[in-house]
Amino acid sequence: MIDVRPFDSLGGADHGWLQAKHHFSFASYFDPARAHWGALRVWNDDTIAPNTGFPPHPHSDMEIITYVRKGAITHKDSLGNTGRTEAGDVQVMSAGAGVIHSEYNREPEDTQIFQIWIEPDRRGGPPAWGARPFPKDDRSGRFVVLASGDGGDGEALPIRTDARVLGATLKAGQVVDYPLGARRHGYLVPAVGAVEVDGVRVGPRDGAAITGVDTVRVKALEDAEIVLVDAA
């Protein structure tokens, strides 16, 4: 089953400094049919104005993955971590028993991010944060694991849940397969460009909820940059 959720159908909010679209119920947006997808709880498509951002606020018991699409995001938290994550790169915060953090766009242009929340396998534990670059050329024509709960996924950032976050860049006409597994929950969003997922068109920033599929086949209808979550 592939359920396409067009960008224009997503929930959202206009906060002035923040233009937000919500693939799943979040804050004042609630849709019981889009409360979660397996362990995937949040996928927000955020555009943050220059020199603005999220002031210090708490989180607990959530794996929070930030995929930067344009610009950069600057992180600071109560653990003493600070970092600037640029377009194409990824940061992960395991909120654990509790952490306070802020996220600001310190750039002279808009910053665009996907913020993805996945429920952890277990509650509590010490919070943690990490970030690393993932050059788009390394993802050309193939999926690269960006974050994973499987310690065998090479240089992927660790998360505390049975899930993977993957990225790929495809030229028009290229095809890439991913062995999802029929019992898993896949959620795919093209950050740029349109694709076909098992023959079903998914436009830029649309969401595709996938289940009951052993292998997902993605064909780029135009040059595309895609992000996929594989969750229990």
Image (cartoon, rainbow, N blue to C red):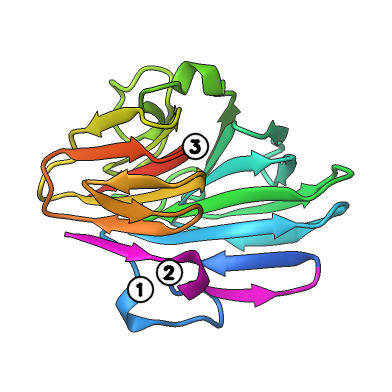
Q: Which mark is residue 192?
A: none
Dot in front, 1 or 3: 3
Q: Mark 2, mark 3: which one is toward the viewer? A: 3
**Crowding near pointer 1: few (<14 within 10 Å), some, many (20+)?**
some
- Is 80 placed left or right of 26 in the picture? right
> Does residue 86 lie above or below 13 as drawn?
above
What are the residue bounds of the magenta stretch? 1-16
User: In the image, is residue 10 part of the stretch drawn in magenta?
Assistant: yes
Q: Nearer the viewer, residue 23 or 127?
A: 23
Q: Measure the C-alpha gap from mark 2 to mark 3.
A: 21 Å
In the rendered image of this protein, does residue 226 appear above or below residue 123?
A: above
Q: Residue at x 37, y 31 (%)?
A: 173
| Quadrant (top left/top right/bottom left/bottom right) for the N terminus | bottom left
Residue 194 spot, x, y in % from top left? 44, 47
Is the C-beta separation of discs 1 and 2 under 8 Å? yes
Q: Position of residue 203 (x, y in %)?
A: 44, 54
Which of marks 2 and 1 precedes in the sequence?
Answer: 2
- Residue that badge 1 annotates: 34
**In the structure shown, which secondary structural element does the residue marked by tag 1 occupy?**
helix
Q: Residue at x 43, y 32 (%)?
A: 172
Which amino acid type is shown beneath numbered disc 1?
Answer: Arg
Badge number at residue 225: 3
- Rendered image: mark on residue 24: 2
Q: Pointer 3: residues within 10 angstroms few (<14), some, or many (20+)?
A: many
Q: Look at the numbered disc 2 and give the secondary structure of its residue.
A: loop
Q: Is residue 122 visible?
A: no
